[in-house]
Image (cartoon, rainbow, N blue to C red):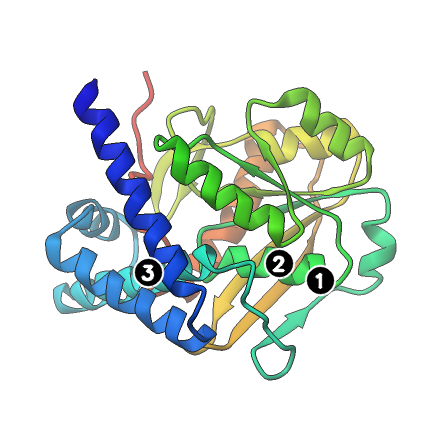
Amino acid sequence: MILNKIISIFEYAVVRTLQFVLRFQSYRRISDAGALAGVFFEHIGIRKRVAIENIRRSNLIIHFVQVSQLVSSSYEHLGRTFFELLALDRIDLKQVRDYELILPGRFYDRIAGGAIFISAHIGNWELMGKVLVEKGVPMAVVVKHQQNAGIDRLINRQREKAGMVVVYDDEIMKLRRLIEGKYCIALLSDQDFGDNTVPVNFLGRPCFATAGPVYLANKFQVPVFVCFAIRRSNYFHRFEVNSFELDMSLSMEKQVQSYTTEIEKIVKTYPDQWLWHHKRWKVHA
């Protein structure tokens, strides 16, 4: 117990120090420092075995050498994304120079009464949230409690400084108020933290997905969009919001599978930018 507390304090101190140093750097240096951190974490092997196992278990048809390259690229992208998150409040991206934003027709009219945004851990989803807020989208992001409470608060402060409202997945009443307040609710729906309940097929293997986006869309009768952030180069992003129609006449399982298939498509297109380091294909009791 005491050892865990000491480790948590140390982890927070390291991350807080990193954040302080990054405040004095340019966006490109922040991103490049993150890439170097990714190389370091790959070298010491943090969750590397999980990433390799996930890639091999998927239906991606790639050679052994390509698996190693894919893992390395994934670490680099994850490092960039985390460091950019630590400095989210001071990164000032300019449209055309730093990113392109693709929105569907009548987007602002359609989200006037609120919406559900389904996204995934690909590219820099945090920067996409910041850009959408800057473009006048009322954003609330659903997050899970992190094990390190200090780092959890630090990260959520960055999101809040960028204009996003943070709501934990167990804050049901707050989430309801935000939806009734016509917020766009963003959910990262590509991972399984042990509480997913709907059986689906993802990358060629059976697993479980969350019913959250479908449940909220059905209950509150708001439109659904799938949103993906793609890193087109080290410092240039494409933020894409696509209309998505849930067929509410179908079963919950088929509706959840429909959005899971959209996530699968983007992962197959940009596998080097997805978070492979989490155990996706869990067996539930």
Cβ atoms at labels 1 and 2 below 8 Å apart: yes
Residue 24 location, x and y as percent?
Answer: 43, 69
**Label 1: how many Cα within 10 Å (few below 14, some 14–19, many 20+):** few
Residue 134 marker: 1
Above or below for 188 versus 69? above
Distance in Å between CA atoms under marks 3 and 2 = 18 Å
Measure how far apart labels 1 and 2 are at the Cα level: 6 Å
Give the amino acid at mark 2: Lys
Q: Helix, strand or loop at disc 1?
A: helix
User: Residue at the spot x=20%, y=56% of the render?
Assistant: 41
- Determine the image quadrant of residue 205: top left
Q: How many marks?
A: 3
Which residue is nearer to you in this view: 223 or 232?
Answer: 232
**Label 2, on which residue?**
130
Residue 7 position within the rendered picture, expressed as x and y whole percent measured from the top left:
21, 33
Disc number for residue 79:
3
- Work out whether 166 lies above or below 275: above
